[in-house]
Amino acid sequence: MTDENQNFEARLLTPNDYKAFATVYNDFVNRAVTEYNFELEPLDFEGFIDAVEKKLIECVVLFENAIPVAFLVYTTTISEAIELNIIHSFKMENMVERAMYLLKKFLELTKAERLDKIVCYPMLGSQKDLIGDIARYGFKFVGIAVLRFMMAGTNSRDILKITQLAPLDSEYKLVDWQDKYFEDAVEVVQEGFEDSADALFDPRFKTIEGTRDIITKIVKNIYAEFLPEATTILLCNNIPVGFCFMNLTGGRIANIPIVAIRKEHQGKGLSKHMLKKSVEKLIELADNGIKPISEVNTTTETNNFQALKMYRHLGFKEDYNYPQSYLPTKDL
């Protein structure tokens, strides 16, 4: 795609571009935490180029007068969706205008794949300014809240410590993860998420096969380090009916990727019991020096008031919100 009047060109990154592109990429690295709310530092330039050359990610670069000024990164290798990871403009200049050039090229490059794959795009940080513009291309949006339980510096621990939950009925029991519960987890999670907002931007939740792929990636350390000792299962008469998964990113940030419970057991406060047990285990791991965990975080929809209330009740605090955008296949 070329604009002759402004001399813009958007195309995939090539080895000939690496030297000039490094400046733009390193500008992004320096802004990843402050401008885009990244929890961890992104790949350094050499690591990024290695991922591009291995086709783990694709990078579309915008050139202005043959000089790299912005880029877009996406991947098709992790899930059934096309994941648009980041759009960045050098020094955050002309963000909207440059992003639209990159987005048009991205949609052109992925046209064939989008016949049967949705696009998902978490619009972290400054990227939320692009909402109105990408909506014109058919993107839809779900509000996502990020919540954190801090091991130090807040009163999260105090709130958790004084939280009293009603005792579990005799037929219920909480246990740690074991591999024998894998297929039960697939069934429970699929039932709980197939009609959720998550399924809009991750269609794997709509099928047993897709959900099995998600759970496999969680427990096999694909997404992050799996913490089986802090993953809690709720049993009812020794049958698994609920799951609270835990993993660890960067060696210090615990994350709750999924909390799910069978529908007939919902509304009884049982998810709180699972979550409380898992967080207490993380505190134990941190205090005993086994894992240097600094926080526990999770996400939920901004209009999921029941989930938000549960997390707040156990010491989590809302940190920030962002739009999770997705482009359905029907909009092609």
Image (cartoon, rainbow, N blue to C red):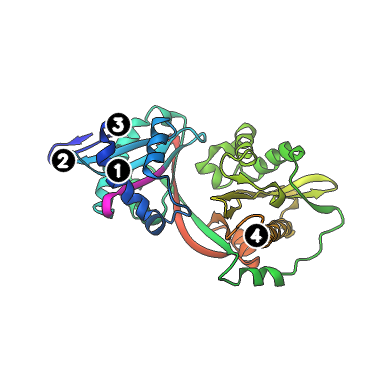
| Residue assigned mark 4 | 286
Residue 330 appears left or right of 26: right
Residue toward you, 79 or 287:
287
Residue 65: mark in rendering = 2
Residue 241 horizontal/vertical position (percent): 75, 47
**Between marks 2 and 1 in the image, the one whose residue lies nearer the viewer:** 1
Separation of marks 2 and 4 at Cα, in angstroms: 52 Å
Are the residues flagged by discs 4 and 1 in contact, CB closer than 8 Å?
A: no
Three-letter code, disc 4: Ala
Residue contact between numbered discs 2 and 1, judged by CB atoms under 8 Å: no
Q: Does the magenta-highlighted stretch encompass residue 218?
A: no
Label 1 – label 3 distance at C-alpha: 11 Å
Q: Evaluate whether residue 298 shows in this view.
A: yes
Circle number at residue 15: 3
Q: CA distance from mark 3 to mark 2?
A: 19 Å
Q: Are marks 4 and 3 in contact (CB under 8 Å)?
A: no
Q: Secondary structure at mark 4?
A: helix
For the residues labelled 2 and 4, say whether their Cβ atoms are less than 8 Å apart.
no
